[in-house]
Amino acid sequence: MVAGQELRRLRDTQTTRRDLLGEAYENRGLIFRQVNGRPLHARNLSQRDFKQVVKKARLPMTRFHDLRHVCATLMLRQGVNTKIVGEHLGHASVGVTLDVYSHVLPGMNWDE
């Protein structure tokens, strides 16, 4: 299913849940949330929910944490400033970001 169609289906499902729960539903404007509208629990997301999504999408199993590296790599490859990427990742300094991701920066490889 196309991502836009899936998001519309999710919105419709959530609208139905909100209507059923009435005032018990916490509308925080989140796309991915618990049935009652509250944010997903981080541990459940990384340990249970993510695995189900990957399996349902028939993607190769990967760790939730790997998404962090993919995001950083894509940002750096698109030319986002290393300091900005490090701040998004919560690194203590730009040096940490460079130590981990210098191999993906243009001009930082031996073979370039």
Image (cartoon, helix red, strand yellow):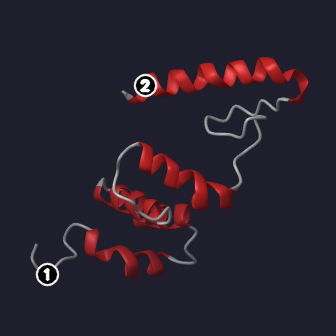
The percent position of residue 45, horizontal first and vertical second, equals: 61, 54
Does 66 appear above or below 75? below
Which residue was labeled with disc 1? Answer: 110
Q: For the point 58% across and 68% down, which residue is it? A: 90
Q: Identify the residue at image location x=36%, y=27%.
A: 2
Q: Secondary structure at mark 2?
A: helix
Q: Amino acid at mark 1?
A: Trp
Q: Quadrant of residue 112?
A: bottom left
Q: Is residue 99 left or right of residue 8?
A: left
Q: Quadrant of residue 13?
A: top right
**68 or 38: which is nearer to us?**
38
Residue 36 is labelled as none
Q: Quadrant of the N terminus?
A: top left
Q: What residue sits right under mark 2 in the picture?
A: 4
Q: Is 53 drawn above or below residue 42 in the view shown?
A: above
**Residue at (30, 53) in percent of width and height:** 78
- Disc 2 marks a residue whose amino acid type is Gly
Q: Earlier in the sequence, mark 1 or mark 2?
A: 2
Q: Residues within 10 Å of mark 1 (few under 14, many from 20)?
A: few
Rounded to the nearest angstrom, the CA distance separating label 1 from label 2 is: 41 Å
Residue 30 spot, x, y in % from top left: 67, 36
Determine whether label 1 and label 2 are within 8 Å by CB: no
